[in-house]
Amino acid sequence: MLKGKRSIFSVPALALLVSACSPGEPPQMPAGMDVDDYDIDALVAAADPNRGRTQFILCQSCHSLSEGGPHKVGPNLWGFFGNQAAQAPGFNFSNALRESGIVWTNETLDAFIERPSDLVPGNSMVFVGIRNPLDRAAIIAYLKQETGAE
């Protein structure tokens, strides 16, 4: 970057741009699975957490992952797998999420990442979601690796 000039791209945006342009084969649905009818547990088991790390760039401005890490706009996600939603101490969750009764599993997290407002109408997460189930599976695999779930 030129001295005194500011980039219009943030570091996460540049990383996402570079990863989108990286050579290599895009992930494919496993044989016998369709984009509209898939087994999220099988996709997560086969997913590459490193790909999930790249996809998580979309989430990292709002969520931290490390044990004892800070809450940001969204809660720190350490240890959330297998637990009921809206349980992170010190974070002000929406009533909709607190009252949802959701327990975070591969299936519920997949639905939430796909479109948070569809799974929990009235939640305060301002994120439109990720349509591709392979991208969601990679994020879930990465989250499990980074938040103490595995």
Image (tube, rainbow, N blue to C red):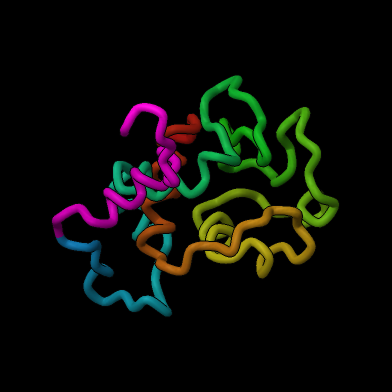
**Quadrant where the C terminus is found in the figure:** top left
Corner quadrant of residue 26: bottom left
Residue closer to the observer: 145 or 50: 50
Residue closer to the observer: 58 or 141: 58
Q: Is residue 60 magenta?
A: no
Residue beneath the point at 79% across and 62% down: 122
Residue beneath the point at 59% across and 65% down: 115
Corner quadrant of residue 64: top right
- Residue found at the very far left of the displayed protein: 24
Q: Is 128 situated left or right of 90 in this image?
A: left
Residue beneath the point at 69% across and 45% down: 84
Horizontal and vertical percent position of residue 74: 66, 41
Q: Is residue 5 magenta?
A: yes
- Up the image or down, 56 lies above or below 27; here it is above
- Residue found at the very far front of the displayed protein: 4
Q: Which residues are magenta?
A: 1-24
**Quadrant where the N terminus is found in the figure:** top left
Residue closer to the observer: 60 or 146: 60
Horizontal and vertical percent position of residue 141: 39, 46
What is the count of numbered marks?
0
Horizontal and vertical percent position of residue 120: 72, 62
Horizontal and vertical percent position of residue 12: 42, 42
- Up the image or down, 67 lies above or below 36; here it is above
Corner quadrant of residue 36: bottom left
- Up the image or down, 18 lies above or below 146; here it is below
Residue beneath the point at 40% across and 35% down: 5
